[in-house]
Amino acid sequence: MIFRSRRPPDFEQFLKVLRRQGRPNHLPNYEHVASPGFVERWLGRALRPGLEYWDDLVEFWLSLGFDCMPMEVPLNCPLTDAAAGGHGFGSEARAVIRTREDFEKYPWPTESAPLDFAPFEYVARLLPAGMKIVGGVCMGPYEWVSLMMGTEGLAFALVDDPELVTAMFERIGRLIVSADRQLATVVAVGALRQGDDLGFKTSTFLSPENLRRLVFPIYRQMTDLAHAAGKPFILHSCGNLAQVYDDLIDDCRIDAKHSFEETILPVEDFKRQYGHRVTPLGGLDVDLICRGTPEQIRADTRRKIERCFADGHWALGTGNSLTDYMPVENFALVLEEGQRVC
């Protein structure tokens, strides 16, 4: 391990960032996920199976100096073999629902048990004082529906069978909201989060109108129950969301946004436009961290800190995630720069 934070976790400092209330005592860190390959190279050993996998992740996030443990578990919605990985991953072969008959026959989980809560309960017992879980469902409503119907299948169904599409979003939405409602009651969960990649470089996958009709009402239910429990809500979403940022901030009422791409909207530009209404998280260029020189990485990290943390309402991290192909020693440079901030 080439870097290990000596700073004890203090989730209250991260809460100041999320709520934009007061300046934290240190610059918090935040990531949406870390790939298993990155974690293993950082720890210098293979991840263990079963529940001990979570022991390893707690050690990992603590060593990075995080005040929170980012964590997500998928819905209990079975998928095809192609959907589980391998060469078919990402193809239309993943689709399990094409017709109303498929929808009716699908083995949907109950709303009382939408996912396996055991990992959250296990991690809650592992966390040291001062550290909290930032947790939620793995994949959001758009991602689940486009996965289960296929991207093309969803596109065709929006025209050929819009009622089926509506039913899909309603069913997935109820499952995710039920999961979040239960997670919000867990004392060790300090904030709720949702990853749901809504767009690509130039636009959203669904039209803004369809997002407002099918997806955003689910988000609003999620944020409402988080806020009712006194907890913030973080949205991770890739892509160009320029047409719907006002919806996400004003109508969905998210507290923080993660995932920023330099070629779409650099985090400092987002901060300038929206930072008084929502907290940006991360935003360091993954490509630069992977391929830049140490001098370039340090300089870019300092620039982002200067431009985004002047008011104390930002967290240090990548624009997307800690990837398999990211050199761990390069990300250590980012963390070192962050810990120099008082």
Image (tube, rainbow, N blue to C red):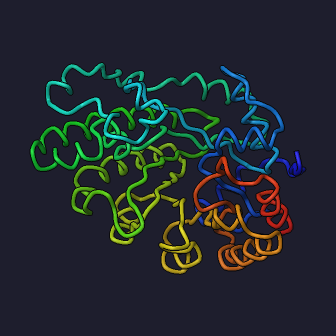
Residue 275: tell me if it is visible. Answer: no
Q: Quadrant of the C terminus?
A: bottom right
Q: Is residue 265 above or below residue 165?
A: below
Q: Identify the residue shown where x is 35% and y is 39%.
A: 147
Q: Identify the residue shown where x is 37% and y is 50%.
A: 219
Q: Quadrant of residue 289?
A: bottom right
Left or right of residue 42, residue 82 in this image: left
Residue 288: tell me if it is visible. Answer: yes
Q: Is residue 168 above or below residue 276?
A: above
Q: Is 252 in front, or is 152?
A: 152
Q: Is 76 in front, or is 310?
A: 76
Q: Is residue 62 above or below residue 310?
A: above
Q: Is residue 282 above or below residue 101?
A: below
Left or right of residue 25, residue 35 in this image: left
Q: Position of residue 66 (x, y in %)?
A: 74, 50
Q: Identify the residue shown where x is 79% and y is 70%.
A: 293
Q: Quadrant of residue 45?
A: top right
Q: Position of residue 276 (x, y in %)?
A: 52, 75
Q: Position of residue 335 (x, y in %)?
A: 80, 60
